[in-house]
Structures are given as structure tokens and as C-alpha cells.
């Protein structure tokens, strides 16, 4: 028990790798599931008994009654998004509020942050990031500027005055950017009931987690977004505003590196990206193109925004980089079934720039836009893997594809997804 059985689950691409399904599955044997960074920009899909639930702020372990779910200090929490999600789950019969705690150190996403998100994107014009418009970047800006409001501030009788002053100050920036300022008094009236609902869930989750660790509770840390969207190591500036790897787990939970346990990287059997920014393995995504075909077959439309995802072949140059950054111990490979009909499967094993093979992902955006993927082409298996649960029941060429990934990355693939449902998984 304890840290040796703890697990960190991280996306190793540009998000939407299928973390929700993996976390839901592993949560069965977990006492505590912790979100450590990001906010309602995440969209984690869990399918149980054919029923689909998309979680944004709530940890994906919430569907297991045993699990206590923690929204850690590194998360940015939008009170309305939280209330909406709780309502949606309770309408489906789940009593979740009694198993949920929100860190008193977590920053709040306020209406001004959403307005700022829109205003910054507008101001960037063609260079816009393509954010989820959930106010994530501006909320983290406020945190770093030391001007943000935190969940624990709700207990302070003067918080309404602080909120008012804050909205007024932020409105000046929104106006300067040509955005739509927030109606301050109306925003406060609208926010009040959401904040009131949130208040009883707010606690010192850092202290709580330390007590849980001392009591040998098993924990899982749920990554959001993906390592290539990390604010430091991702394809900056086309990234999110938090650290999406193990670093974010430590700072965003308040636990030490000793508590992390096994680091599991989730990798989609091909690659997707939503929003702007360089994407070396991108395929033709217009109607009739290969990318479009994979998008349709894989249902690659954003779980949060509904936007079509850009698609490409598997990029092990990017995944290898993500593995090295995070000390990944094992891989959960998802959506293998989506590749079933392909005749050939090109896999990018490295990037080349100006005729030179690189051993990572360049930081410079212009260089990244110019890299050429070096592909090794594997044969497709052209047989159904849908719903397969045993390694030996996978077609030989599908097993070869998995073995190639393991060999190239030097990391074992312990889980293979063969469908969206909880049960459609090969465990090795
Ligand atoms: P997350 O953000 O990493 O949790 O991933 P998303 O939920 O945004 O997107 C993953 C999508 O793939 C969801 O619609 C899942 O239901 C689906 N999915 C996950 N694993 C598998 C799999 O192995 N096969 C298939 N066909 N779909 C999967
Ligand atoms: P999950 O957890 C995929 C992308 C956005 C945009 C960039 C910045 O479901 O994998 P933001 O709103 O965070 O400021 O947007 O990051 N992005 C995601 N892409 N999956 C996600 O989450 C994402 N969260 C943010 O599309 O390119
Ligand atoms: Mg998602």
C-alpha cells in the first residue's frame, strides 16, 4: 500500500489521449483521485455500460463510489462549471459532492478571465492559440501576478469587496484589448449562488492528502492536457498555461515526489491536436484526406468544445520526448481499434531538420514548423480488434505494432484500448 501503489496518469501527446477511460479503469482500486492542474479546459470521457460521461473539472475517478476526489491547489476552478458538472452527475443518480474536496489554495476562474481569454485571442488574430475559451490562461496569469482570488478566500467576510475591486481592475485590461468588459454588479449577483455551493467543499487538501498518505491510502494523480501542451516543454506559445507533467502533479497537489508511484503515460495509437500550433505529423485534414478519414473513424471532435481535431500518424519523436521528461514507467495505448482498416501504418521515429536527425523536439517555433518526420512504415492488420481483451487475441500485426512502440520508446505497453467502454481493454 501507499506510495508504491500510487499512480500518475499523464497524456503524452497534445491532449485527448484517452486519459479519462484509463483513469476510470484504474480508479477501481484507488482510494483517492487528484486533479493537480488545468481546469474546465479538460474533457475526459468515461464510458460505462454504454453510457458516456464527460468530466471537465471533476476527477475521472468520481464514478467509483469508493474514491474520494480532490481538486488540488494547482487547478483553476470556475464555480459555475463546477456546479453544472455536479448537477449533471447528480441528475444521473451519482452522489458526488460528499466525496469531493476542493483545495483552499486553488485559484478561481472568474467572468473577467473568460472575457480576457476571448480578448487576447482576438488581439492575436491569425496567431491565436485556439484556446478552449474557458478563461484558463488569464486565471493563471492572475495567479502568477499575485492578484488572483483563491477558493479559500470565500471564508473571508471582505471577499465580495475584493472580488468587486478585482473585476473593476481587470475590466481596464479587457477594455484596452478591445474586449467586452464584465458587468461587475451583475457578475457578482450571478456568481454568488455558485460560490455559496462551492464553499462547503473547500478544505486544506494538502493537509488532507498528507494524512491520507500517512494512512497508506492509494492515490492516483490525474493529468489533464498533454505533455506537448506543457507551458515550459510544449510547443510554446501554442500550449496551455500549466505544467502538464509530473512537475505539475507535485506543485499542484502539495505532495512530494516520493508519493507519486508509477508514472503511466497515455498514448493514442495515432496523434491528434486541437487548436493552433505546429504539428509535424499532421495529415491532410480536408474532406477526403487521410486525416479527415481518421477523424471520422475515431470520432475526433473535442470533448469540451466540439471542435474537429487535427489528425496524424503516431509521432514517437514527440512521445519519446514526453517519456524522457517525465520518467514514464509504462504506457497505456488507446484507440488501437481505430487503425483496424489501415493497410500501412507510418510511424514517426524522429524529426529531421535541414538534413540532420534530431534527438528531441526543438524549442524554436520556426524550426518546429520546418522539421520533417522520419517515418518507419509498418504493415496494417486489417482485422477487427474491437472489444478484444486478451493479448493473444490481437492480430499478429497489431501485436507487432505495439512491440515496435515498446522497442522504440524503451517503455512497456501495459494496457491497450480496443474501444471506448471500460471493458474494452487488453491488460498485460
Ligand atoms: P482525454 O481528454 O485524454 O480523457 O480523452 P477524450 O475523452 O477527450 O478523448 C478520447 C476519446 O476516445 C473519447 O471519446 C473516448 O471515449 C475514446 N476512447 C478512449 N479509449 C478508446 C479506445 O481504446 N478505443 C476507442 N475506439 N475509443 C476510445
Ligand atoms: P484534455 O485534458 C486537448 C489546448 C487548446 C489550445 C491550448 C490552450 O481533455 O486532454 P487553453 O484553453 O488551455 O488555454 O488552450 O491547449 N487544450 C487541449 N487540447 N485536450 C485538452 O484537455 C486541452 N486543454 C487545452 O485546444 O490549443
Ligand atoms: Mg479530452
Image (cartoon, rainbow, N blue to C red):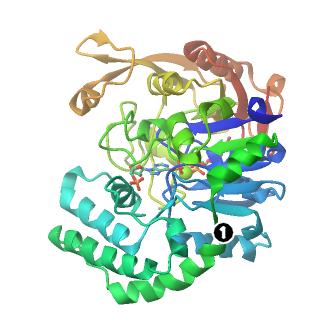
Q: Is residue 215 above or below residue 302?
A: above
Q: From the viewer's perspective, is residue 340 above or below residue 421?
A: above
Query: Residue at the spot x=65%, y=37% of the render?
Result: 8
- Residue 409 as seen in the image, left or right of residue 150: right
Is residue 4 in view? yes
Task: Identify residue for label 1.
Answer: 201
Of all residues shown, which one is farthest toward the front? 157
Q: Quadrant of residue 95?
A: bottom right
Q: Nearer the viewer, residue 155 or 103?
A: 155
Q: Could you say which quadrant of the image residue 351 lies in? A: top left
Q: Residue at image x 32%, y 16%?
A: 352
Residue 358: quarter of image: top left
At horizontal 58% and vertical 32% (from top left) the residue drawn is 269
The quarter of the picture where the C terminus appears is: top right
Q: Which residue is painted at 70% across and 63% down in the image?
A: 100
20 left or right of 123 in image: right
- Near-viewer residue (180 or 297): 180
Amino acid at each position: 500500500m501507499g506510495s508504491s501503489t500510487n499512480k500518475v496518469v499523464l497524456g503524452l501527446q497534445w491532449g485527448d489521449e484517452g486519459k479519462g477511460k484509463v483513469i476510470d479503469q484504474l480508479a477501481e482500486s484507488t482510494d483517492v483521485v487528484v486533479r493537480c492542474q488545468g481546469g474546465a479546459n479538460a474533457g475526459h470521457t468515461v464510458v460505462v455500460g454504454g453510457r458516456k460521461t464527460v468530466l471537465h473539472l471533476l476527477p475521472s475517478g468520481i464514478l467509483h463510489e469508493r474514491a474520494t476526489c480532490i481538486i488540488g491547489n494547482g487547478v483553476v476552478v470556475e464555480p459555475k462549471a463546477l456546479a453544472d458538472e455536479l448537477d449533471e452527475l447528480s441528475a444521473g443518480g451519482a452522489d458526488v459532492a460528499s466525496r469531493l474536496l476542493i483545495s483552499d489554495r486553488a485559484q478561481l476562474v472568474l467572468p473577467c478571465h473568460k472575457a480576457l481569454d476571448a480578448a487576447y485571442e482576438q488581439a492575436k488574430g491569425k496567431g491565436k492559440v485556439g484556446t478552449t475559451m474557458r478563461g484558463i490562461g488569464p486565471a493563471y496569469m492572475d495567479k502568477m501576478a499575485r492578484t488572483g482570488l483563491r477558493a479559500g478566500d470565500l471564508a473571508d467576510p471582505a471577499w465580495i469587496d475584493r472580488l468587486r475591486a478585482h473585476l473593476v481592475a481587470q475590466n481596464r485590461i479587457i477594455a484596452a484589448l478591445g474586449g467586452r468588459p464584465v458587468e461587475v454588479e451583475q457578475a457578482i449577483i450571478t456568481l454568488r449562488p455558485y460560490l455559496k455551493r462551492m464553499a462547503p467543499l473547500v478544505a486544506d487538501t494538502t493537509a488532507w492528502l498528507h494524512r491520507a498518505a500517512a494512512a497508506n491510502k492509494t492515490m492516483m494523480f490525474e493529468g489533464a492536457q498533454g505533455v506537448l501542451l506543457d507551458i515550459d516543454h510544449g510547443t510554446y506559445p501554442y500550449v496551455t498555461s500549466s505544467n502538464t507533467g509530473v512537475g505539475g502533479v507535485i506543485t499542484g497537489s502539495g505532495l512530494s515526489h516520493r508519493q507519486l508511484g508509477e508514472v503511466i503515460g497515455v498514448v493514442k495509437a495515432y496523434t491528434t491536436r486541437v487548436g493552433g500550433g505546429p504539428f509535424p505529423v499532421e495529415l491532410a485534414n480536408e474532406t477526403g484526406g487521410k486525416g479527415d478519414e481518421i477523424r471520422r473513424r475515431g470520432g475526433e471532435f473535442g470533448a469540451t468544445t466540439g471542435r474537429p481535431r487535427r489528425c496524424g500518424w503516431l509521432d514517437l519523436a514527440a512521445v519519446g520526448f514526453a517519456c524522457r521528461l517525465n520518467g514514464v514507467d509504462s504506457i497505456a495505448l488507446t484507440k488501437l481499434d481505430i487503425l483496424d482498416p489501415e493497410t500501412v501504418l507510418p510511424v514517426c521515429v524522429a524529426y529531421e531538420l535541414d538534413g540532420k536527425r534530431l534527438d528531441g523536439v526543438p524549442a524554436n517555433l520556426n524550426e518546429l514548423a520546418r522539421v520533417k518526420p522520419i517515418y518507419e512504415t509498418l504493415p496494417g492488420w486489417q482485422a477487427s480488434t474491437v472489444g478484444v481483451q486478451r493479448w493473444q487475441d490481437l492480430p499478429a500485426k497489431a501485436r507487432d505494432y505495439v512491440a515496435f512502440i515498446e522497442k522504440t520508446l524503451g517503455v512497456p505497453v501495459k494496457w491497450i484500448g480496443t474501444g471506448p467502454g471500460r471493458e474494452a481493454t487488453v491488460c498485460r
